Amino acid sequence: MKLKSAHTLELPKILDQLARYAAFSLSQELALSLEPTPYLDEAQDRINETTEARGLLEAHDNITVGGARDVRPEVARAERGVVIEPQALLDIRATLRQATTLRRILTRLRGQFPTLAAVAERLEECTALQGEIGRVLDDTGQVLDSASPKLARVRRDIRIAFDRLHSKLNNIVHNANNAQYLQETLVTQRHGRYVVPLKAEFKGRIPGIVHDQSSSGATLFIEPLSAVEMGNALRELELEEENEVRRILRELCEMVSHEAKYITRTVETLALLDLALAKAKYANALEATAPELLDFRDAPHPHPGSTLLLKQARHPLLDPKTVVPIDMELAEDVFTLVITGPNTGGKTVALKTVGLLVLMAQCGLHIPVDDGSKLSVFREVFADIGDEQSIEQSLSTFSSHMTNIIGILEDADEQTLVILDELGAGTDPTEGAALARALLDELVGRGITTLVTTHHPELKIYGHEKAGVSNASVEFDLKTLAPTYRLIIGLPGRSNALAIAEGLGLHAPIIASARALVGDTDLAADDLLDEIHRKREETRRAASAQVESFQKAEELRAELRGRLHEIEEERRRVLTEAREEADNELEALRSEIRRMRKRLQAAGQPLDIIKQVEQETATLDENMLALPVPESQVPGDNGDTPDFRVGDLVWVSTLNAEGQITELSASDAEVMVGRLRLRANLGDLTYRSKTESKRDKKQKRIAIGPRGRAATRTEVSTKTATPGLELDMRGQRIEDAIPSMEDYLDAAYMSGMPFVRIIHGKGTGALRQAVRDRLHGHPLVQRYETGKPKEGGDGVTIVTLVKQA
């Protein structure tokens, strides 16, 4: 795209802000050189990449490319055979380590972030090189003794030679006979040799080689002759160490040279990933969203089929606390917008906002707009904005604008966006208006999406009458005599000169005289526009008040819902406490009955009296079991569907069985009945208290003996007792199990159960075969089948009973 238009719309300032979020130099360079793409697919890929990066930062806020370096220059030097510094080798290892970490993270998260994972596939780990650098160098860049056996030996010899030399020199400086000759009792170093400080006047008293003297000449630094051979031996070892270190580093650099192309590609890929993360961080800072990018749609000529919809768009370079958002929308039949209004009213800012956001989106940046914004991807964006006088070329403002517009007309087509500020300004108003209209005719006729601002009132009529063109204006508050910076699509701007002058205190006779000079038609048009703007503002305020009222109503509804929930929770708590208290009292009464029985038996009463008392206490026990919870305390007692909760005990009327709710929806519930899970309509469920559940279980135990055998007690009728949904016969002999199953089927049929579950286990299969042989042709059995895998498989038989007549 044209660099001049990008600079006019201030895209470089955006890229400069973006570069501040980059982690290392190469990604900063990429950010500063970022250019809008004219291709829809590429722009969408860029936007998706930024969206994924924002999601990645949200899920893993500690992810970063920090630690990576642009090591390409060092790698190039290694390719030329240069031995690079140890610190450069450490930078290469740190960069490869960061690449390894990012590659593994994004590979693991490929399902969530496929675009970034595809980029990360180009990262090379170079694990052998990483390991070798770590083996040779420590974290400060020093070559380790373990880098080679020879280096370890040489350094060991250096330490021994050093200790011997220093021991010799220390003996010399601490010798009492030499104390008067020495400036200080220390050993120091000059030009790589270890020396002692000798007073100049005692030169020769300690035989040795002079290597240096002090600036005053009072001290000579000599190497005693007795230590020269030791010094030579140490120096030879140090040179041998330097040669071995250089050899080791050269081998490392050769490895770097062999991996050069992979390291270079890794650095460049890291820069791309860091750029994506920088875009994400910048988008978060702007509170931006991803626009929907669209291709040019089919539209009748001359409409180019462009789309421009920006909701609550904010200029990213303005203070977010004070910037006024604008809504920019071109209707389906409109592709040219003529914006009118007073100076400093925000017309130019509106143009720059639209143009800049288009360029940002095509760079792959999220833009500061609300959700639902849509943009076409333009091949080029042309902009002529502001005063561009050229002193060097002796061009006036008008000439400068015309030069720019001529260049734009040569390059613009149906897939470009043209932005023109103050069209026709800087010359005679009449000629300027005529020229502006002619230029608009040219742009509209060629089907070029165009946004223009102007002061010429003639263009207001043009925007109203010309097909494909619409008026817009920036709002001005006559009460405060200040612009509101809001953009109004569909209405031209008003002429506010007389109103502003009157508001500023210009004498009334002058205002009246000026009004008389203005044509009646113009005054009537201004009055009509004033009335339209006033009505529009009233409508906007009414809509705002309606939205506010709706929000308050929603808040009140939420508050009331919360209060009702609290009340329901309190009601349930009171009912639970009442039920628990009743259960406790019943249990205490049962304990008292058992205690009385024991006392009667212990008192040695006649047998007939004891039996009479036992019968009376048994009757009392049964009556207590039959005590119901007051119906008014049971949820749903008013005939409505009960307000069930997960965990409630319920009676399933279709099965004549008790279960517990494990899952709830608006119309049905999942109920656990024994080991079975089934869904039942809420209308088929009845709330059960703990007392009712205990009573029924006790009656069931009385009516049905262990493993389904019928009880012999006659006090409780078994005609309507529910035997439960399943019969467990595992461990029983066939001769005991079959009669037990017969009794169970009779009880299940009498209680109206539609099906039952016979658990016989797998084992040898003998009991299963006996059960199914008996079920075959049984008068109460409609059909039977093997249980499903989740129901127990071959160890279970599901029996469907015939319906009662």
Image (cartoon, rainbow, N blue to C red):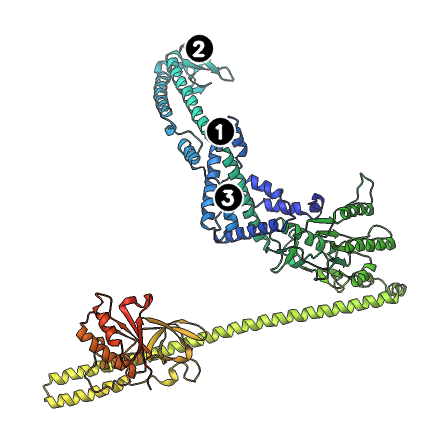
What's the CA distance linking mark 1 and mark 2? Answer: 43 Å
Q: Residues within 10 Å of mark 3 (few under 14, many from 20)?
A: many
- Lower sequence index among marks 3 and 2: 3
Relative placement, left or right, of 82 versus 442 is left
Relative placement, left or right, of 411 versus 191 is right
Kindly identify the residue that appears in the image at 41 percent across and 11 percent down.
208
Q: Name the residue type under label 2.
A: Lys
Relative placement, left or right, of 610 versus 21 is left
Relative placement, left or right, of 26 versus 717 is right
Q: Residues within 10 Å of mark 1 (few under 14, many from 20)?
A: few
Q: Which mark is residue 203?
A: 2
Where in the figure is residue 539, as x and y percent of width and height? Answer: 70, 70
What's the CA distance linking mark 3 and mark 1? Answer: 23 Å
Residue wearing tag 1: 85
Q: Which mark is residue 65?
A: 3
Where in the figure is residue 160, as x and y percent of width and height? Answer: 34, 21
